[in-house]
């Protein structure tokens, strides 16, 4: 006698068969269709304050309006002269802020020149007059357009104060007059000069946003030149891909309260900096380079950061290449918020981690 299988719930069988036929009938993408033609239309959602972030971050977000996405995406075409006027205005107005930070965080600023490039020595008051062999090479952010002169110093001042390590900030030249690869070339000039007085094992390099990406681009260049590499890197939420690729550029659009959207100013700055070159070129978008042999690297980002994916992609490529890479992701933080809310728990933790990281790897 044949065995018979009885289903306790016949309606369940009908449901399973219905789902199976639905999947089989679903339209599959043809060979001519690309993955980029497939998008999800996400309905509007309510986003509460990040309850697990620090009180400082929650208070900051509670005090500001929701980011205006439509306004952020609008950016009129500018002539070189209009770019230049805007850059000069922001650089001049930002210099005062750097002086206030230097006073608040007890850091001495000294302007100088190294190998034809303007630099700023940022020395903690506690280190004045002392000889220290360790030095942090700081590269400021600002979308490769802003942050010239003293206006780009605040994070470097914070690093000097909280790591208690002397910092040299490179005032690399920028667009509209000096597009890529000038920033890379200027930084390499400074680094070559430093190698005459410092062992590479006593040097660290880093910065945030464009400064973090520039750090990666410079190390790619140093590798190509077969120069000794810095002992450690600090790469904060790097603009590692100028070509608008990465999940968080879409997921966190309108949520990151600092950048808000890749479209608008950020896309215009990328175009200005690239000056007609392929945005996926290694020097412009260092995530596409070979990370084999890179120094130990500390990376920082946040869950609301538009550049979260750009940081994660760099970290993954480093791990695959066998590089020591320490990824720090903070709950609720937008782009560089660990720096622009300097007295928050997240900021204090970031630079305490950095101090420990540098002490671990600098000789």
Image: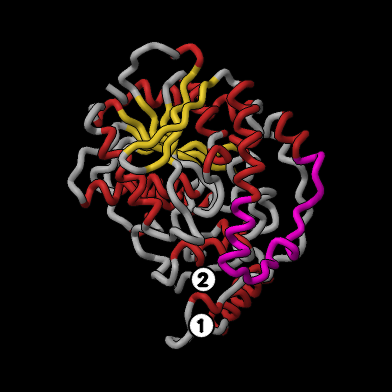
Residue 245 horizontal/vertical position (percent): 49, 64
How far apart marks 1 and 2 lie (CA) works out to: 36 Å
Q: For residue 69, which quarter of the picture?
A: bottom right
* 1 or 2: mark nearer the eye: 1
Q: Which residues are magenta?
A: 61-88
Q: Is residue 181 left or right of residue 125?
A: left
Q: Which mark is residue 4?
A: 2
Give the residue displayed 38% in from the left and 25% down from the top. 358
Asked if residue 98 lies in the magenta stretch, the reply is no
Q: For residue 42, which quarter of the picture?
A: bottom right
Q: Nearer the viewer, residue 15 or 354?
A: 354
Give the residue displayed 28% in from the left and 51% down from the top. 221
Residue 291 horizontal/vertical position (percent): 29, 49
Q: Nearer the viewer, residue 303 or 216?
A: 216
- Quarter that holds the N terminus: bottom left
- Quarter that holds the C terminus: top left
């Amino acid at each position: 006698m044949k065995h018979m299988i009885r289903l306790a719930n016949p309606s369940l069988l009908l449901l399973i068969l219905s789902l199976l036929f639905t999947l089989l009938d679903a339209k599959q993408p043809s060979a001519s269709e690309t993955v980029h033609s497939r998008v999800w239309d996400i309905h509007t959602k309510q986003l509460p304050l990040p309850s697990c972030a620090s009180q400082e971050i929650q208070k900051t977000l509670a005090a500001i309006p929701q980011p205006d996405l439509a306004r952020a995406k609008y950016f009129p075409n500018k002539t070189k002269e209009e770019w230049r006027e805007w850059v000069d205005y922001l650089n001049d107005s930002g210099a005062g802020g750097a002086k206030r930070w230097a006073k608040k965080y007890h850091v001495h600023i000294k302007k100088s020149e190294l190998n034809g490039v303007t630099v700023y020595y940022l020395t903690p008051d506690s280190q004045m007059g002392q000889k220290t062999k360790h030095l942090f090479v700081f590269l400021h952010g600002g979308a490769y357009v802003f942050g010239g002169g003293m206006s780009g110093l605040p994070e470097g001042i914070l690093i000097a104060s909280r790591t208690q390590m002397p910092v040299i900030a490179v005032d690399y030249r920028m667009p509209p007059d000096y597009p890529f690869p000038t920033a890379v070339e200027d930084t390499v000039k400074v680094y070559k000069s430093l190698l005459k007085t410092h062992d590479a094992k006593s040097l660290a390099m880093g910065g945030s946003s464009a400064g973090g990406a520039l750090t990666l681009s410079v190390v790619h260049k140093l590798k190509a030149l077969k120069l000794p590499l810095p002992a450690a890197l600090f790469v904060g939420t790097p603009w590692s891909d100028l070509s608008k690729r990465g999940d968080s550029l879409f997921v966190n659009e309108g949520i990151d309260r600092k950048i808000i959207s890749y479209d608008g100013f950020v896309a215009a700055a990328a175009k200005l900096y690239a000056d007609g070159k392929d945005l996926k070129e290694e020097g412009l978008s260092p995530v596409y380079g070979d990370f084999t042999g890179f120094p130990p690297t500390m990376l920082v980002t946040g869950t609301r950061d538009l550049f979260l994916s750009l940081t994660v992609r760099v970290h993954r490529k480093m791990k695959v290449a066998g590089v020591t890479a320490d990824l720090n992701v903070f709950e609720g933080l937008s782009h560089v918020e660990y720096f622009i809310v300097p007295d928050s728990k997240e900021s204090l933790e970031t630079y305490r981690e950095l101090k420990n990281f540098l002490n671990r790897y600098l000789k």
